[in-house]
Amino acid sequence: MKKLLLSFLMLLFSMSVFAQLASVEKSVTGIQAGYLGLWGYNELKLDNELVFRTDLGFDGGVFMGSGLAKTGYLLNPVLSVGIKYYYNLNKRLARGKSIGGNSGDYLMLMSRFHPGGRIVISNYNDLTTSTSVSLSALWGTRQTIGKHFIFETGFGPTYVYNMTLGNSIIERSDKSYFGLAFLLTFGYRF
């Protein structure tokens, strides 16, 4: 009985020590390109499973319609900040999977700011966009491929508030609306 109790205590102790090893990296910086956009990012460690994420880049878009002479595209600058919680790091380690580069499943609360106005790259002249702020709650997964390549996907509800409405041919006329945020990116971490 003593041997069984001792074995159980050693197992319990080793599991608690092992669980403490799982942690996000101190800082991860890189670039990501998605289905519509290009961003530079940084994830800064706040706690073992929590990071502060910042992105600076361009969200892209394609638009077309019967009143347009040609299909259009735009790249709109965006700044985003968020808190990311990686909730399965210990489980990944226990299964022998890597958590390098902050690989794992996560929940994220993210806010995005588009400055709007004429700060936009497009094949249409004099295109303006509205200044907007959005708040999204995302569930996602991030996987490191090799040492430097990243694949990330996620989705969740989003709320968008247009602070100004542009005179654009492509925007919603709603002051605010709910939608679905979708994330699909490939990237390189430095």
Image (cartoon, rainbow, N blue to C red):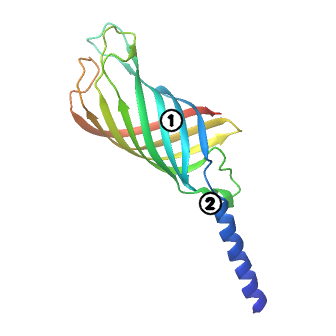
Q: Helix, strand, or loop for circle 1? A: strand
How many neighbours does mark 2 have within 10 angstroms: few (below 14), some (14-19), or many (20 or more)?
many
Q: Which mark is residue 90?
A: 2
Q: Quadrant of the C terminus?
A: top right
Q: Is residue 30 left or right of residue 72?
A: right
The amino acid on which the numbered mark 1 sits, given as a three-letter code, is: Leu
Q: Are the residues tagged 2 and 1 within 8 Å (C-beta)?
A: no
Q: Which mark is residue 184?
A: 1
Q: Is residue 107 left or right of residue 125?
A: right
The amino acid on which the numbered mark 2 sits, given as a three-letter code, is: Asn
Relative height, residue 123 to residue 134 (above, below): above
| Residue 69 pos. (x, y %) | 32, 6
Q: Helix, strand, or loop for circle 2? A: helix
Q: Is residue 108 left or right of residue 172?
A: right
Nearest-to-viewer mark from 2 and 1: 2
Query: Would you identify the image quadrant in which residue 11 lies?
Result: bottom right
| Residue 98 pos. (x, y %) | 68, 50
| Residue 164 pos. (x, y %) | 23, 27
Query: Would you identify the image quadrant in which residue 130 lies?
Result: top left
Q: Nearer the viewer, residue 44 or 68?
A: 44
Query: Would you identify the image quadrant in which residue 28 lies?
Result: top right
Residue drawn at 47 percent across, 37 percent down: 183
Q: Quadrant of the N terminus?
A: bottom right
| Residue 47 pos. (x, y %) | 55, 55
How many neighbours does mark 1 have within 10 angstroms: few (below 14), some (14-19), or many (20 or more)?
some
Residue drawn at 38 percent across, 36 percent down: 112
**Numbered marks: total:** 2
In 3D space, how far apart are the residues under numbered discs 2 and 1 (Cα atoms)? 25 Å
Q: Is residue 91 left or right of residue 153?
A: right
Dot placed on the residue nearer the N-terminal end, 2 or 1: 2
